[in-house]
Image: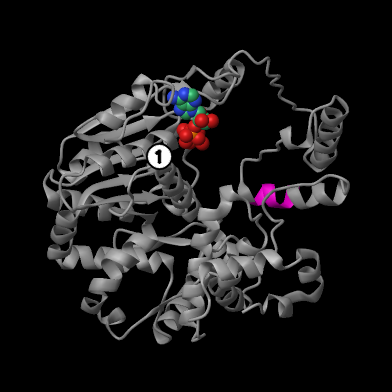
Amino acid sequence: MFVWDATELNPEQAAAVEEPSSVFLVACPGSGKTRTLTYKIAYELSQRTDKRIVVAITYTHRAADEIQERIEALGVDISALWIGTIHSFCLEWIIKPYGIYVPELARGYTVLDRHDREKMLDRLCSVYRSVTFYDCEYYFEGDGYRLGCADTRKHDSIHQVLAAYFRELADTRRIDFELILWYSQVLIRNQPHIAALLSQVFSYVLVDEYQDTKQIQYNLVGAILRAGAGRTKTFIVGDPNQAIYGSLGGYAISVSNFRALTGIPIREMVLRLNYRSSARIIGHFSNFNVHTTDIEGAGEMVGFPSHVTYNRLVAHDDLHDELIRLIQKSLAEGHAPEEICVLAPWWILLASTTRKLVALLPDQQFDGPGLVPFSNDPDNFWFKLSKILLTDSSPQMLVRRMRWARDVIADLRDFGVDTAKISQRSLLRESNSLAIGALLETGPAALNLV
Ligand SMILES: Nc1ncnc2c1ncn2[C@@H]1O[C@H](COP(=O)(O)OP(=O)(O)OP(=O)(O)O)[C@@H](O)[C@H]1O
């Protein structure tokens, strides 16, 4: 039996974990949402009375890895757990087994990875002066697709780019991440036995970060829960104040709409205690709340005398100089570099700011978006291999690196390499023996380690 003590979960968290019915959990920032979700999964896995599977849908592969590792560390058997992103879920449970029912997928398909998608869209955009790959984000809603680009003047060109993009995908029998969702919805809609079957296979469907979930994703989860008529339960957690993907169709559904969608009884619960911030920061945050939530400081930093200022005098063009002045001032006052953090409202601003700061403060080490040589793409073989090569061979990393090694070997096998003599351990041993400096000098040839 999985148990915990009072220092691990507060009463609100414990109540959500032990709640026997389905739960809609609204968790304020820093309230231990991930911890609660992790314990809930562990609790339900340990309570299982049948062979059904517990499904947890996370926003990123990284979150899935982290939660899975935390559950393993709690000593709970994870053999009945499936955890991953909604796209992996759809591929694994809907597209692979039932894709044959969709004419566009019936003759086979491959999934376009992010890198190839970017290259293809770059090429298709090149004939239009003002449109770039970044403008071409889209998502499906209702019976059509919508554009993420806020600049409506570009929409005609983007629609033309996407028409060519969809044609090329169809001609080469490829699907991208949005099409995975789209075809899953088509299958779930047209073949009601799929949702019925999945509801028999799953005892629980847990969803993280619901505030960034799209209509099509709610529909997929909703269809399975509805088909289960209460036999499949749900635990959906998020924070309506932390929604960041509105432009890509994500939104925080209300509990009443989620109940209507699923047709099952769901209890609304909250996590109000914030463990991360000082009372001053929590007070400041309340100015930006879009949904009224009650937040109370409970962490060690609650009494920290945070300094919150609002500068209306710095011109936009001088922003980077001002950031440098603030960083240098903090360093001169004795703060460690790793205690300094710069935030921006949009990811794109953050990427360009990071690059400028790196150029202007060459003596400091920065970590931020826009600095990696290639993007965090879990489908890219080189990304997986570089994770093994660039991480320490410490005991804490062993389980994780073993899993990466397993993925790399599986990919090699798919590429046609004879992997009979390569084990996870031998791959790690080889990687550990490589000196990274030499590797960087010799370039890709040195990566030819198998
Ligand atoms: N019951 C608890 N007692 C003490 N500390 C806790 C408790 N629950 C969570 N924490 C701490 O609070 C911090 C935030 O936890 P976590 O990252 O799980 O929160 P979150 O709600 O997922 O955050 P976010 O705002 O990023 O969504 C972590 O440092 C965690 O260790």
Q: Is residue 98 above or below residue 260?
A: below
**Would residue 350 be counted in the magenta stretch?**
yes
The residue at the point 34 percent across, 67 percent down is: 91
Q: How is the image coloured?
A: one colour
Residue 317: % across, % down:
81, 43
Q: Quadrant of the N terminus?
A: top left
For disc 1, the neighbor class at 10 Å (few under 14, some 14 to 19, many from 20) is some
Residue wearing tag 1: 74
**Would residue 169 be counted in the magenta stretch?**
no
For badge 1, the amino acid type reads: Leu
- Left or right of 307, for residue 381: left
- Left or right of 79, for residue 429: right
Q: Where, by quadrant of the figure, is residue 331 drawn?
A: top right
Residue at mark 1: C-beta within 8 A of ligand 1: no
User: What type of secondary structure mainly makes up the magenta span?
Assistant: helix
Q: Nearer the viewer, residue 345 or 339?
A: 339
Instruction: Confirm whether residue 69 shows in the render.
Output: yes
Q: Is residue 187 above or below residue 24?
A: below
Q: Quadrant of the C terminus?
A: bottom right
Q: Where, by quadrant of the figure, is residue 327 drawn?
A: top right
Bounds of the magenta segment: 348-353
Residue 290: % across, % down:
46, 30
